[in-house]
Amino acid sequence: MAFESLTDKLQNVFKNLRGKGRLTELDVKTAMREVKMALLEADVNFKVVKQFVKSVEERAVGSDVLNGLNPGQMVIKIVNEEMTALMGSEVTDLELEGGKNKTVIMMCGLQGSGKTTTAAKLAQRLSKKGKKTLLVACDVYRPAAFEQLKVNAEKVSADFFGIENEKDPVKIASQSLKAADENGDNVVILDTAGRLQIDDVLMDELVRIENAVTVNKTLLVVDAMTGQEAVNVSQTFNDKIGIDGVVLSKMDGDARGGAALSVKAVTGKPILFVGMGEKLDALEPFYPDRMASRILGMGDVLTLIDKAAEQIDAAKEKEMSAKLKKGKFDFDDYLESMNQMKKMGGLTSVMSMLPGMGNMFPGGAKMGDLAGQIDEKKMNMTEAIVLSMTKAERSNPDLLNPSRKHRIAKGAGVDIAEVNRLVKQFKEAQKMMKRLPQMMGKRGRMRFPF
């Protein structure tokens, strides 16, 4: 998971600060030296690190902090505020043209950055806001680019425009505007070609498109897993063609975090979105304050709530709440809860957003270790076992005698031990659910215990 190593190191620094009743200037400087090393190892730009440490130290060594009732907590608060400021302080929206005017968005970036997938993700996001989007295939070099964008356009219910075997991306971009008028599209997203590295041919092509078409927004897609290189790419694209914002892709991978902490400070351009997975709905707005909170191990409950609001079916939630108020919970509910969890990115994703959860695993296990234990294969196996039960067995688990369990194991293609393990886990969950009515409000809505 992104930032895991950085978060662990910062947590250790903060643990030492909290353990001291009083702080000296030397304590602060020692802690910030460790923070500096952690940030550099996370691939944060060294100039950014230098300025960040200087800003924190200047605020932290003041008499109000060192002589306060809880100096360690005050220093952590300052680190949080400075880190948020480093990434842009406030969320930056993608502003679109008003009225009947079309918004033309040019997506650019290096090959392999996830640009084509991000274009489709953005189209889906805008469609939820009532926009009619046209995805345009301007990458005339990568053989699969045309078909990939066409398939993804269909998946996200966006219009598609491309000219097969056409080698001039400027001509494709120009003609796409006519297609947009015919379709009634009010957002046009140009998926341009990438290169393995920045070169004059790539930049010249983007400039020619900008000269031929009125581009309202130029968005650069950079791979967060490339660390410091992502910052260098952002700076070069901004210097050559001028960008309006950055999308960090693959933030769900083993990203060290440097790009997120450096891009805004180095380029002056905001991070607008982050890609959190391969699925076409896995594009999230970039909230600097929430990202800082996650990096510092303080969780991100607001994003978790947003995800829940997007994914949880209101009617099903009401039905589930009614059953829980009566203390009822069966295998169908268990399966539904698991499916909701999968829609929100899985249990590991949810737990990573809860404050302090990263340090709660036995034996010093990390969040990444947990991901290996609670993987998609196990969730799929659980689903297969439940679906191998009869309707009566799912609604009344007490019916599950040994012979029925053997039949279910055979139907799911698993060992009988897996069925027994699931039944045991379910009974534990059932006991917990019977205690949940007291955690529910008068109107039957769940009060989450975090």
Image: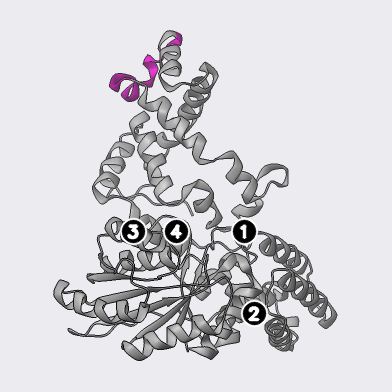
Q: Residue at the far top: name it.
A: 403
Q: Is residue 177 visible?
A: yes
Q: Is residue 431 visible?
A: no
* Residue 404, quarter of the rendered image: top left
In the current view of this chain or complex, which residue is farthest to the right? 26
Question: Percent x, y for residue 203?
Answer: 50, 84
Judging by the rendered image, the residue that carries numbered circle 2 is 78
Frontmost of labels 3 and 2 is 3
Distance from label 4 to label 2 (Cα)? Answer: 24 Å
Looking at the rendered structure, the kind of residue marked 3 is: Asn
- The crowd level at tag 3 (other Cα within 10 Å; few <14, some 14-19, many 20+) is many
Q: Secondary structure at mark 4?
A: helix
Count of marks overlaid on the render: 4
How far apart are labels 1 and 4 at the CA level? 20 Å
Marks 1 and 3, how far apart at CA:
25 Å
Residue labelled with disc 3: 152
On the image, the x and y values in percent for residue 40 come to: 74, 73
What is the span of residues highlighted in magenta in the rendered image? 390-402
* Amino acid on which disc 2 is placed: Ile
Toward the viewer: 35 or 276?
276
Distance in Å between CA atoms under marks 3 and 4: 26 Å
Report the residue marked by disc 4: 304
Q: Which residue matches tag 1? A: 254
